[in-house]
Amino acid sequence: MTVYENLKETYEAYRTDVLSLEEHTTPFAGFLGFGKGAGEAPLHDRFDREVAARVGEMTGDAAEYMDCIDLILFAPSRSGLPGYAVYTQIAAQRHLLPALAALPLGVRASLLDRYRATYPGKHLLPLQTLVLEALQTGKSPS
């Protein structure tokens, strides 16, 4: 399997796990500190670790490299998952910051335009401003 195929499988498994969790979680789970809510499940940390591992494997084929970047940056916008899962997917974008900064200017500009169109400015999370910064400046925020 390629890195992209592994990464795509990671995203698909996370989606399946979240939907299953949603199906089996009561509406007030975690409310007022009773029990744990769906957003506290260990599957979110596992997803983040797996994305980090896949990003660490991204080398070689330029097209596959860009497919991986595209998946990580834009999958949250089209996932249809609950907010806590979308935020987990967005948080995984931090693993891309050095890779984004290292991209050629033209590629960064194209991704920047798409990212801004996909995630309107007034709704950005702090991490997303770091993604924009890496795409704009070519420097990985520290």
Image (tube, rainbow, N blue to C red):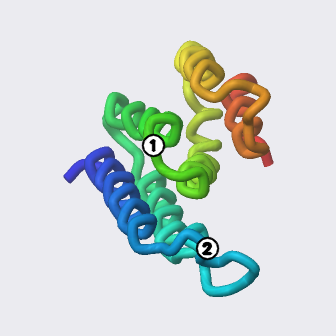
**Which label was assigned to residue 28?**
2
33 up-or-down from 90: above or below: below
Residue 33 placement (x, y as % from top left): 73, 83
Q: Residue furthest bottom?
A: 34
Q: Is residue 125 left or right of residue 111?
A: right
Crowd class of label 1 (few under 14; some 14 to 19; many from 20; radius 10 Å)? few
Count of marks overlaid on the render: 2
Crowd class of label 2 (few under 14; some 14 to 19; many from 20; radius 10 Å)? few
Q: Is residue 95 visible?
A: no
Q: Is residue 3 left or right of residue 101?
A: left
Residue 116 placement (x, y as % from top left): 65, 22
92 up-or-down from 136: above or below: below
Q: Is residue 123 visible?
A: yes
Please name the residue that numbered disc 1 is placed on.
80
Give SS at disc 2.
loop
Q: Nearer the viewer, residue 83 or 26?
A: 26
Give SS at disc 1.
loop
The answer to whether mark 1 and mark 2 are in CB contact below 8 A is: no
Query: What's the CA distance linking mark 1 and mark 2?
Result: 21 Å
Residue 41 placement (x, y as % from top left): 53, 75
Q: Mark 1 or mark 2: which comes first in sequence?
A: 2
Residue at point 45% right, 43% down? 80
Residue at point 74% right, 43% down? 125
Q: Residue furthest left?
A: 1
Amino acid, disc 1 = Gly
